Amino acid sequence: MSIWVVLVFFGIYYAISTAVTRMRAELGSPVHDLHFIGPDEMMPRIFGTRLLGPHNLTIMAYLFFFNRAYRGHPMPHILEGFKLAERTGISNRRLLFAMCIAIVIGTFASFWAFYHISYIEGARDWFAGRPFNRLQSWLTSPRNPDVPAIVAMCIGFLITGFLMIMRMRLFWWPFHPAGFAISSSWSMNVFWFSILVSSVIKWIILRHGGVSAHRKLIPFFLGLILGEFIIGSIWSIIGITTNQPMYRFLF
């Protein structure tokens, strides 16, 4: 992989990682999958596959596994963990040590789970073939820079900048730039109505009860969220125990 491609690729990746982490910290978005916006999708459109060349494109195909989506990106979870440690007085050093142990255990457990499910369900139709089908298209039909895609990126950048300026200058401005960023995420098909209802409820509380009422009611709504997770976990445990499909949450 060419040096300039490596620098641009991981520069875009870490910029997205930082944006996703800030999105969670500032907005508290429940989802941020952001499918197909990574550097492996962006660079061929900006520079064209002819300029990148077969070698760089082939390496990009092998980097698909951590760029397909960002719903499970570790940075937001790590930041939230350190925030919880700060609020509860837990040592950051101990938390970091626990995270390192969890990473090692989780890595081996994930490999085992992947192979186990693959042998049971079959892996032929899973996502592993997608980057190589895309690579085949790149190699057989070399392309120049995608001008409409570049224009769309610039428009998105301008809209995001406008929303950021309005949010900083106008206290009452209701639209968050992070909300615009995640509006096209696949998971918003599942969550959009819940987010709409919660936004309306929050607006009513702030409108008629003020900030003090909003802060007093936060534990109640956090309890609703926690209760949904508990009930969903119970249904999952029942389904695993009885080997029968049960009521599913989210997916």
Image: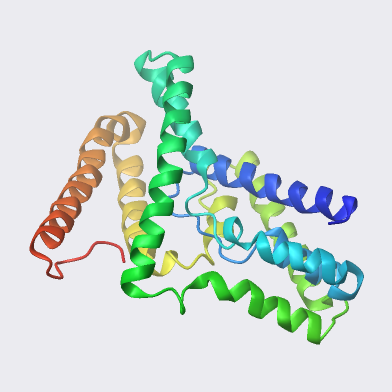
Position of residue 246 relative to residue 175, above or below, is: below
| Outermost left residue | 242
Q: Position of residue 208 (x, y in %)?
A: 30, 41
Position of residue 4 relative to residue 150, above or below, is: above
User: Residue 164: in sight, yes or no?
Assistant: yes
Position of residue 83 relative to residue 214, above or below, is: above
Q: Which quadrant holds residue 19? A: top right
Which of these two is toward me, 61 or 73?
61
Q: Which quadrant holds residue 58? A: bottom right
- Viewed as shown, does residue 187 lie left or right of 234? right
Q: Which residue sits at x=36%, y=48%?
A: 203
Q: Which residue sits at x=75%, y=62%?
A: 59
Q: Position of residue 194 (x, y in %)?
A: 32, 59
- Viewed as shown, does residue 81 lie left or right of 209? right
Q: Which residue sits at x=43%, y=64%?
A: 187
Which of these two is toward me, 131 or 88?
131
